[in-house]
Image (cartoon, grey):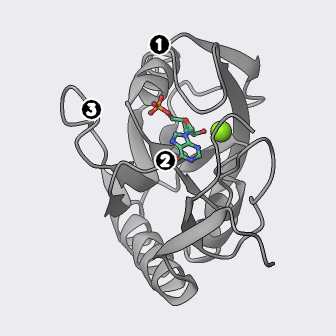
Amino acid sequence: MIDPRIGRIVVGEDELSERVAALGKQITADYTDRPPLLVGVLKGAFMFMSDLSRSIDLPVEFDFMAVASYGSSTRTSGVVRIVKDLDIELTGRHVVIVEDIVDSGLTLAYLRKTLAARRPASLEVCALLLKEGLQKEEPDLKYVGFRIPPDFVIGYGLDVAERYRNLPYVAEYAGSKQS
Ligand code: IMP
Ligand code: MG
């Protein structure tokens, strides 16, 4: 895809597949005796969830939820709304939230609070990307794929106005964030 708005590659395809496979192995080891329920946060996490789950050698279950933050598309306001809730009850389940990227950490803080209230047996987070230096306190993430600089990125599930999700790598966005 030739597009001048696709900037420098931040995480390449090979790096992604290696690291995602390693995370899957780690989850397999940590959850052998209690196969987890993977909760993917739509839409950004769909590709990561798909690849990650194929590296988990356990009878995992899947569910998805969709959240939207009020405000503009590239900045989080911290006020999050559930657009699609889970189908599966969390009570007594070992839950792993699968997130694409943690920026301010506000979306995750909201999700954690909301899902913890449903009394899962355990609740951990697996985030593909963590933007460095943007959180007021170190977010509580059990699994992190990559720590990246705080630039806006696209690809491997991440979008600007619903585009670029299908790029097989993560790149800086070199366009105007308004469009
Ligand atoms: P937070 O609440 O500030 O941590 O923002 C998290 C959400 O904002 C993510 O789940 C993404 O949907 C979106 N987001 C944050 N940073 C980026 C980015 O660099 N590219 C694409 N989406 C992003
Ligand atoms: Mg998004």
- Residue 29 lies, in percent from the top left, at 36, 71
Q: Is residue 68 visible?
A: yes
Crowding at label 1, few (<14), some or many (≥20) Cα neighbours within 10 Å? few
The quarter of the picture where the C terminus appears is top right
Ligand 1 closer than 8 Å to label 2 CB = yes
Q: As rendered, which of 33 and 179 lies closer to the eye?
A: 179
- Residue 36 lies, in percent from the top left, at 53, 51
Q: Name above or below for residue 59 compared with residue 62.
A: below
Q: As rendered, which of 29 and 71 lies closer to the eye?
A: 71
Ligand 1 closer than 8 Å to label 3 CB = yes
Residue on which disc 3 sits: 135
In which quadrant of the rendered view does residue 10 lie? bottom left
Label 1 sits on a secondary structure element that is: loop
Q: Quadrant of ligand 2?
A: top right
Label 2 sits on a secondary structure element that is: strand
Label 3 sits on a secondary structure element that is: loop
Give the mark nearest the N terminus, 1 or 2.
2
Q: Name the amino acid type tagged 3.
A: Gln
**Mark pair 2, 3: CA separation:** 12 Å
Residue on which disc 2 sits: 101
Give the mark nearest the N terminus, 2 or 3.
2
Q: As rendered, which of 108 and 7 lies closer to the eye?
A: 7
The quarter of the picture where the N terminus appears is bottom right
**Mark pair 1, 2: CA separation:** 23 Å
Mark drawn on residue 117: 1
Q: Is residue 24 left or right of residue 13?
A: left
Residue at point 69% right, 17% down? 82
Q: Is residue 58 visible?
A: no
Q: Name above or below for residue 22 compared with residue 136.
A: below
In which quadrant of the rendered view does residue 147 lie? bottom left
Q: Name above or below for residue 12 compared with residue 52.
A: below
